[in-house]
């Protein structure tokens, strides 16, 4: 599992990096907000550990900017801020969890494991002859890798994760696009057409059904 640690206090950063690497994680670090956001947007991480108070950009600003591009990678705030208002503000910005400094390293490990539980327990999702390797962030059809954009991968992952359940357009636009207001859901059809074309599935192998007027359902 690959983690991004954005922390400007060098002692804390080195301590956490060493401890996490000893636990088997691959850790990349940044000591300011601008570098942290650049790394987050241009590299694939399984989880981001984000300090709130950072030079150049705050953790809150990073979180908001990152969530505009990526709605699935877990973000865990490491911060001395602990008022209810600040906690709510961080969660509204897209954070998945929040741990107050100073904290126990063992507690941090457990919180990380909770966020990575799905990837640890189900590293490969299967839909017919389509496989989604969450750890490698790769999609294959009959063993041949298919190149998907980040949003195409997120949408396919979401549908397969909910295999057998009808996913409404509202649920998809909220959970995959993180849009929580009235919005033209036709964008979903555009991405679905692109996914089906790239997977090159025959009619009888179209494992993602269109539920007219409702949404989509993955089922094999």
Image (tube, rainbow, N blue to C red):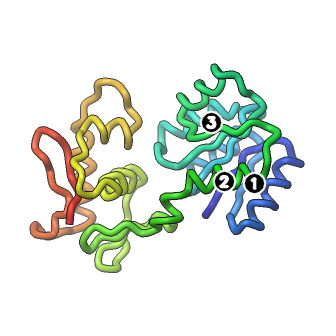
Residue at left 72%, top 49%?
107
Is 215 on the left-hand or right-hand side of 180?
Answer: left
Observer-side mark, 2 or 3, equals: 2
Tell which residue pokes out farthest to the top in this image: 85
Tell me: residue 90, above or below residue 26. above
Q: Which mark is residue 86?
A: none
Residue at left 53%, top 35%?
94
Give percent across and percent down for residue 36: 68, 45
Q: Residues within 10 Å of mark 1 (few under 14, many from 20)?
A: few
Tell me: residue 136, above or below residue 12. below
Mark 1 lies on residue: 106
Mark 3 lies on residue: 62
| Cβ atoms at labels 2 and 1 below 8 Å apart | yes
Q: Secondary structure at mark 2?
A: helix
Query: Which of the two labelled residues, at mark 3 and mark 1, occupies the earlier sequence position?
Result: 3
Give percent across and percent down for residue 162: 31, 53
Query: Which of the two labelled residues, at mark 2 and mark 3, occupies the earlier sequence position?
Result: 3
Is 114 on the left-hand or right-hand side of 192?
Answer: right
Screen quadrant of the C terminus: bottom left
Q: Secondary structure at mark 3?
A: helix
Q: Which mark is residue 110?
A: 2
Q: Residues within 10 Å of mark 2 (few under 14, many from 20)?
A: few
How far apart marks 2 and 1 lie (CA) works out to 6 Å
């Amino acid at each position: 599992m690959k983690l991004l640690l954005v922390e400007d206090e060098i002692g804390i950063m080195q301590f956490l990096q060493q401890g996490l690497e000893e636990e088997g994680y691959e850790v990349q670090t940044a000591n300011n907000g601008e570098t942290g956001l650049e790394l987050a947007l241009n590299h694939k991480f399984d989880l981001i550990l984000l300090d709130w108070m950072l030079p150049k950009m705050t953790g809150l600003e990073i979180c908001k900017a990152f969530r505009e591009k990526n709605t699935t990678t877990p973000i865990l705030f490491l911060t001395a801020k602990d008022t209810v208002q600040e906690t709510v503000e961080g969660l509204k910005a897209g954070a998945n969890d929040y741990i107050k400094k100073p904290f126990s390293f063992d507690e941090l490990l457990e919180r990380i494991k909770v966020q990575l539980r799905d990837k640890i327990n189900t590293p490969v999702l299967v839909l017919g002859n389509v496989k989604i390797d969450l750890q490698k962030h790769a999609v294959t059809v009959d063993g041949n890798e298919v190149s998907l954009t980040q949003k195409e991968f997120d949408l396919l992952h979401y549908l397969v994760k909910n295999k057998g359940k009808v996913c409404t357009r509202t649920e998809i636009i909220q959970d995959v696009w993180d849009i929580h207001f009235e919005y033209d859901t036709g964008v979903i059809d555009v991405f679905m057409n692109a996914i089906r074309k790239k997977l090159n599935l025959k009619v009888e192998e179209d494992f993602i059904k269109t539920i007219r007027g409702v949404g989509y359902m993955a089922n094999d």
